[in-house]
Amino acid sequence: MCTRAVGALGHYLERGGIPTTQISLIRDHSERIAPPRALWVPFDLGQPFGTAHDAAFQTRVLEAALRLLESPSGPLLVDFPEDAPDARDEAGVWACPLALAATAPADGEADTLEQGFAREFAQLLPWYTLAVERAKRTTVGLSGLPPEELGSFLSGFSEPPFPGSPLSDLPLAAAFKLAAEDLKALYAEAALAQPSPRRASAEEVAEWFWKETRAGELLRRLRQKLSHSDDPALKLVALMMLVPMEHAGH
Amino acid sequence: MARLEKLPAGMAEHLLKVPCPQFEEPSFVHGPALAERRVAIVSTAGLHLRGDRPFTSLAADYRVIPGDVSAGDLLMSHISVNYDRSGFQQDWNVVFPLDRLHALAQRSQIGSVADFHYSFMGAVDAASLEPTAADVAGLLARDRVDAALLVPV
């Protein structure tokens, strides 16, 4: 969708007198919209400059996009000649090094998904804190909730009555969506900061979250439960904005 | 992947069916040599400052990102879940290549980096962007920008 949006923006900004160049992630959309100048890149959606922590590669993409500005005529749609470096081509395997104990306490009672998630979340939180200290940065912080409250807030949507929105001007469905994004980011940042034989690919991080964590299982369960909600906004978020299409069916 | 054949079948099919606006008589604006250009990033990743309003609807509005923003202050609230965020989580330059632009300016490959950058949220109806894009064009002109780098996710 984003490639379509930048295609249209290219036309509108030029109409306003601003020369533009752009990255295209979906070639078909750029072919149909024909923005003034576009560089198609064969990278993952979400990674328009190809790969993290590789300044030389990112710079090559940037230079190729900017060079299009010097062409005398258009529209131009040029293919970037390199694939992004794939972590899976490196030696070793990536597996989340955090041992998230899936086992219930020793009292013999099988625990609920919510209890298992609460335990997993509590285990992960110190690793997240450490990751933020190391990176001096976090992308968690959309919902207005402190990180340590994300788990209980989201679990609260398992059964009514649901929690209230953490910010007075934020509708509940939006708060729910943003908290879910915060939770995913918290898990990814904690996992990615751990020492590992090699880097993780985008797909590996997603597979880990959606297939191996209680958090992923909880969000899938909430998707299913809230898809029957009487609140149309919550229903829409649950169905369309919570779980990626390819992981929704598990 | 942005190679359609690598995307899950349902998603590739969906993307190919998406309607795209058509533009008759498109503009093609020229400018000076690249080494003299002032460059701004215009993203559709739903980026905004920590504390600014997140993107929570399909409104075609935008957020202003000051040029002195630090990586720790930039968040992403795009509504789509069907793309990777781990790249941005590890290195903001994957989506918002501000450090890379500054390096090009230092090497005099571009003239300068703009004082302000902008982000929309790209899941909106593309045609609905026209009025707000006109506003942003005016803001870019006032910042003397003569190269907008449009970046999707």
Image (spheres, helix red, strand yellow):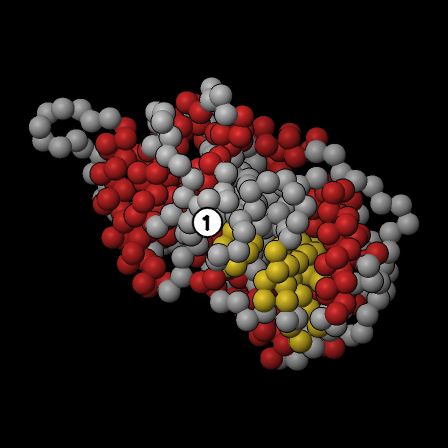
Nearer to us in this view, B76 or B135: B135
Callout 1: chain: A
Query: What is the residue that sits farthest to the front in this orientation?
Result: A168
Check disc 1: other Cα within 10 Å, few if <14, some if 14-19, many if 20+: many
For the point 54% across and 51% down, the residue is B53
For the point 77% across and 62% down, the residue is B138
Q: What secondary structure is found at the residue carrying circle 1?
A: loop
Which quadrant: the N terminus of chain B? Answer: top right
Image location of residue A32, percent across then percent down: 78, 41
Is residue A6 toward the left or the right of residue A237 in the image?
right
Image location of residue A116, percent across then percent down: 24, 33
> Which residue is identified by label 1?
A142
For the point 66% across and 34% down, the residue is B15
Query: What is the residue that sits farthest to the left in this orientation?
Result: A107
State whether residue A136 is above or below residue A30.
below
Task: For residue B18, say whether it is visible.
Answer: yes
